[in-house]
Image (tube, grey):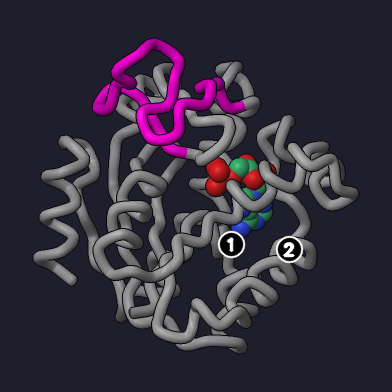
């Protein structure tokens, strides 16, 4: 199953992608996670991408297209994958359609109010990228339940200004993808609890 998961930041994409990946035993490919890892390793790509990310901007299409193409060519993607955070605009979607056929596109719809509340609370594991927030608190403060590493605030979740820039970018560039993928689209109300949303996705898939 080759799936894209679409939604604003804070819509719960990462959480649902992880659940789907575990359930279908297919890789969860998050371009944001790949870029954060590159940055943590201080690679040239990571440092360059961070110049855009810290301002709430998208990185250039050529860079992210190349990352995704190389990742999808790996053996573990043969039976399927969940793409999270890609494509983010029509140019990326056109590029993707030339290299692979997608089966379904899940769209998690949430209001801006909810997005702000969730982002204010969101913490991620500095090692395994597990996401914590309103709906999932760690057992021990600021420590990941899964691997015991430290939880951190994402660099681009810290200021309201950055979040607003990202949301405007999402509306302008990413929302037109709903029309692009209308034949494959599954729309889901993303405002509830993660487990309920997951059940709804499984039902509609
Ligand atoms: P995310 O974790 O998906 O919110 O991504 C974090 C940041 O990485 C974004 O704000 C962008 O700066 C960059 N990024 C991730 N995916 C893409 C993409 N498909 N196109 C351009 N930039 C991206």
Of residues 142 and 89, the one drawn nearer to the viewer in this rendering: 142
In the image, is residue 139 above or below residue 194?
Answer: above
Residue at 35% across, 20% down: 117
Locate residue 140: give its quadrant.
top left
| Circles 1 and 2 in contact, beta carbons < 8 Å | yes
Q: Residue at x 11, y 45 (%)?
A: 196
What residue would you read off at disc 2?
61
106 and 1: which one is in front?
A: 1
Magenta stretch, residue numbers = 130-154
Mark 2 vs ligand 1: CB below 8 Å: yes
Q: Considering the image in quadrants, where does the C terminus appear? A: bottom left
Within 10 Å of disc 1 (Cα), the crowding (few <14, some 14-19, many 20+) is some
171 w.r.t. 51: above or below: below
Q: Is residue 23 magenta?
A: no
- Whether 148 is drawn above or below 19: the answer is above
Residue topped by disc 1: 89
- Which element carries disc 1, helix, strand or loop? loop
Residue labelled 1 has its Cβ within 8 Å of some atom of ligand 1? yes
Q: Quadrant of residue 111?
A: top left
The answer, for residue 96, to whether it is visible in the render is yes
In this rendering, which labeled residue sits more in front, label 1 or label 2? 2
Q: Main secondary structure of the magenta part?
A: loop
Viewer-nearest residue: 2 or 9: 2
Looking at this rendering, what residue extends furthest in the front direction? 148
First of labels 1, 2 by sequence position: 2
Q: Secondary structure at mark 2?
A: helix
* 172 on left or right of 71: left
Q: Position of residue 116 (x, y in %)?
A: 40, 23
Asked whether 145 falls inside the magenta stretch, the response is yes
């Amino acid at each position: 199953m080759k799936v894209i998961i679409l939604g604003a930041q804070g819509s719960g994409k990462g959480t649902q992608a992880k659940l789907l990946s575990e359930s279908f035993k297919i890789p969860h490919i998050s371009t944001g996670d790949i870029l954060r890892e590159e940055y943590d390793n201080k690679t040239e790509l990571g440092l360059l991408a961070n110049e855009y990310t810290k301002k709430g901007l998208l990185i250039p299409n050529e860079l992210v297209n190349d990352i995704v193409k190389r990742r999808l060519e790996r053996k573990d993607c043969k039976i399927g994958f969940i793409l999270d955070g890609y494509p983010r605009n029509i140019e990326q979607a056109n590029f993707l359609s030339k290299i692979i056929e997608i089966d379904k596109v899940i769209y998690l719809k949430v209001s801006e109010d909810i997005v702000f509340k969730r982002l204010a609370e969101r913490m991620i594991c500095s090692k395994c990228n597990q996401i914590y927030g309103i709906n999932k608190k760690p057992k021990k403060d600021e420590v990941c339940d899964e691997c015991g590493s430290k939880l951190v605030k994402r660099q681009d979740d810290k200021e309201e200004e950055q979040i607003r820039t990202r949301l405007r970018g999402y509306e302008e560039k990413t929302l037109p993808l709903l029309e692009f993928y209308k034949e494959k689209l599954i729309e889901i109300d993303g405002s509830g609890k993660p487990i309920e949303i997951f059940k709804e996705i499984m039902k509609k898939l």
